[in-house]
Image (tube, rainbow, N blue to C red):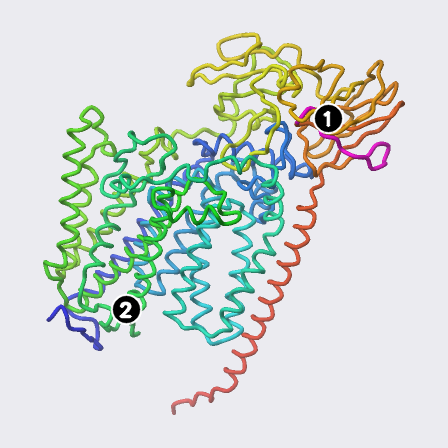
Amino acid sequence: MSTRLATTVDAAPVPSVDSRAEKWLFALAALLGVLLLAIPAWPLLSGRVPIYLDLSMFHLPIRAFYSRCLAAGHSFDWIPHLYGGMFLTGEGEHGPYHPLHLLLYRWLPLDTAFSLETFLHCPLLFLGLFVFLRRYVRGTAALLGALSYTFCSSSILHNIYPNYQGVIAHLPWLLWLMDLASATNSAPRRRLALSILALLTGSQLLLGAPQALSFSLFAEALFAVFLVWHRRPRWTFWASWIAANLLGVLIGAVQLLATRALLANSTRDHFDPMIGSLMPSQLLQLLAPNLLSRHLPRFACSEPLYFGAVPLILGLWWLTIRFPLSAIRYRTDGGLRIADSGKRLGLFAIILGVLAGWLALGDNGYLYCLQTRLPLVGQFRLPGRYFTLVAFAASILTAIAFDHLLTGIRAGWKASWRQLALPWAVVGVALALAIAFRFAYPKENGSSIHRNYFAGPLFLCGAAAALTLAARGRMVGLFALLALTVVDLEVFSVQAPFWRESLWRGLPTLTEFAERAESPPRPREGRWLDDAFEMPHPAFFGQPVLQGYHGGLEPMKRLNYRTLAALRVSHTAWQHLSRFDKPNPVLGLRRVDELWYEVPDPLPRLYLVSRAQVSENPAADIQRIDLKTTALVTHPIEVEAGEVGSAALLHEQPGELRLRVEAPGRRLLVIAESYDPNWRLTVDDKPMTVERVNGDFLGCVVEAGEHDVRFVFRPPSVLYGRLLSRIGFGIVLLIAGVSCFQMLIRSRRAAGARPPLRSCE
C-alpha cells in the first residue's frame, strides 16, 4: 500500500488487529490512570496533610484562618496575621468566595478539607482532558493524552499552588464546552453549554490565581480561532460565547474587584515582569530531565521543562508523516469515524505550543515584551510558566499521534523508515548531549536515575523503539508506549525529583505538623519579624508577623522594618532568624539565643499621643521622633499637649476592633494595625475619618473624655462584588433552566411525532 495514497476501509475491523487487544489497551490505560491518581490522593486517604513549600508557608495557614472564621461566623476579608494586617480577599491566591471553598472549610475538618482541595484538580484535569480529547480521538488515545499532561513535571510542580492548578483544571472542560456549542444547531443546547461555560469561567475568577487565568484565556482565544476553521459555527455562537464570558466575569466580580483594589496599593509595579524568563539553552531539558538545573543564573526560569519522552517522540513523528492518515475511514463499534478532525486539532496544538513557548522565553524571545504593555497581564512575572501550555499542547499531540498509530494498524498501514528518521535523530542528539555533559560536569552525575544525564536519552530511545514497532504494524508497540509513559511520569514527575523531598511521602498529620512550631525563649506579646519561614508558618497558629506571602500581591509599606524604630512602632517583640541562611539580625536588638533576637521596649498595640508631626518620608522621620509621645501623619492635625491618656481593647475579630478610650484632651489614637482605605470608623457611633499614622498604621482623633471607638473593615469592592456575583449566578441559572425546559419540550414533541411500533404477529 502506498504511503501517499488515502485508504478507505468501510468493512468490519481489519483482521490484522484483534479488537480484544484494543479493549485491553484501553483497560490498561484506565487502570494506570487510577493508580497514578492514587498517589496525590494519598494524603487524603491517610489522614495527612501536604506541606511542601508554599503549601505550608501560605496555603495551609491561610486555610486554617479561613476555617476558623467560617466556624465562628466572622468576616475573612481582613487577616491580622500577615504584613501587620492585610486585605486577604484581594491577595489573589486564596479564593475565599468560591462555593467549593466555602463548603469544604465550613463543613469538613481542616486537614480533610485541605487535602481534598489540593487533590481535586488532579481528577478534574484528567477527566476534562479525556472528555475533550475523546471528541477527536479514540478512548485509549484520549486517556494517554490526559495521563501525559496531568502527571507531567510541569503540572506536578504547580501542585503546591492549588488555586493555580484549579484554574488550569478548568481549561479542557472549557474547550470541550466551546466545541459542543459550536457543533450544535440546537439553540437550547448551545445556550445550555455556554451557560455551563459561564459558570466555569466565573469559577476560575473566584479561585484567583490571575496568571493561570490569563493562560487559560490565551488557550481559549486560540481555540476560538480554531473553531472558525474547523466547525464554521453561525454568528449566533460568537454572540452567545461573548455573552457567556461576560456573565462569567460577572460571577467572579467579587474576586476580580477585590484583587483590583489591592493591586492599586501593592508592590507589583516594582517587580520586573521579565523575572523567570526561559533561556533558549534550557530547552535541552526536553531531551534530559533537570539538564542545566544547577547552572542557571539568578532569576532565570527554574521550572522543569521535561514533559516526557513519549509525548516528544510521538509529536515529532506526527509532524513527519506524509500520507493523509486523516482520510482513512474505518468502522469501530458500529459507527464511522473520520480522523480529519484530529489532524486539525493537531495543528491547533502546534500553534498553541509554539506561541506559548515563545512567550515563555520572556526577554529572550521579545514576544513577551508586547504583553508587558497590556493592562493587568503586563504586571505578571515569571513568563517561563507559559511552558505549562506547551506541555498541554504536547499532550494533545500525543493523543492524536497515538490515535493515528492505532488507525494505521487497523488499516494495515506501515510507516516507511524515512518517516521514523526524525525521532531517531533526536535520540542521537540526546545521547550526544548526555556524553558532553557527563564529561563537562562529572562530579555532579549522581547515581540517582533522575540525576543521571543518560536517563532521559535512554527513555527517548525506548520511546522511539516502541514507536517503530507500532508504526510498523505491531500492536505490542502501543502497549510499550503506554507502559513507558507511565514509568517516565513516575520517575521524573510524580516523585518530584526536581525538589529535595517528595510531595507525597513522609507527611505529618495536622497535629504532628502543629507540634513542629517554634516559639520564642519566653512568652512576650507582640508580632514577629520572621526571617525563617520554616514549618509551620506562625500565622498557622494565629501569631501575627510583619511579612507575608511573596507569591501573591504584597501590600506596599512605607517603613523600613529592618530598623529598630520601625519594629518598635509596629508592636514587634521578636526577630526569628533562619537556621539555613546567613544570620541577619536588625541592629539594636538583644540576642536571646541562636535564632531569637528580642526587640527592646516595643510600643503597645494601641496608645494615645499628644503630638502629631506631618511627614512625607516616614521611613526616615520615624528614626528622629519620640515614639511614645509623637506620631507621624500625612496632613496637619491639631492635638493638645499634656498627659496622653489610655486606650483599651474591648473586642477584636478579623476586620473589627472595638476600643474604650479615655483622653484628658484632644489626642491622636494610634493602632498598630495596617492602614487600608477600606477601614470605617465610628466614635460613639458617629462616623469619623480614619487617619494614616506612622506611615503604615491606623489612627484617629478623639476629643477629651471617654469614647467608644470602633474600626470595621468594609471594602466596597467586596460589598458590590458579592452583589454582582449573585446577579450573574442567578442570570446563568435562569438561562440554563429555560434551556433545559426547552430541550425537554422538544424531546417530548419529537417522541410524540414518531409513528407507533407495530407488533409482529
Q: Which residue is mark 2?
A: 339
Is residue 609 depicted above or below 255 in this figure? above
**Which label was assigned to residue 633?**
1
Q: Residue at x 37, y 30 (%)?
A: 298
**Amino acid type for the residue under numbered disc 1:** Val
698 left or right of 533 in image: right
Q: Residues within 10 Å of mark 1 (few under 14, many from 20)?
A: many
Residue at the right extreme of this rendering:
705
- List x then y, in percent, for residue 759: 42, 89
**Amino acid type for the residue under numbered disc 2:** Ala
418 left or right of 267 in image: left
Is residue 422 depicted above or below 45 in this figure? below
The answer to whether the residues at label 2 and label 1 have Cβ atoms under 8 Å apart is: no
Is residue 587 depicted above or below 347 in this figure? above
* Viewer-proximal residue among 302 and 160: 302
Q: Nearer the viewer, mark 2 or mark 1?
A: 1
Mark 2 or mark 1, earlier in chain: 2
Residue 683 lies within the magenta run: yes
* Viewer-proximal residue among 273 and 261: 273
**Which label was assigned to residue 715?**
none
Residue 360 lies within the magenta run: no
Classify the position of the C terminus by image quarter. bottom left
Span shown in magenta: 682-695
Where, by quadrant of the figure, is residue 494 drawn?
A: top left
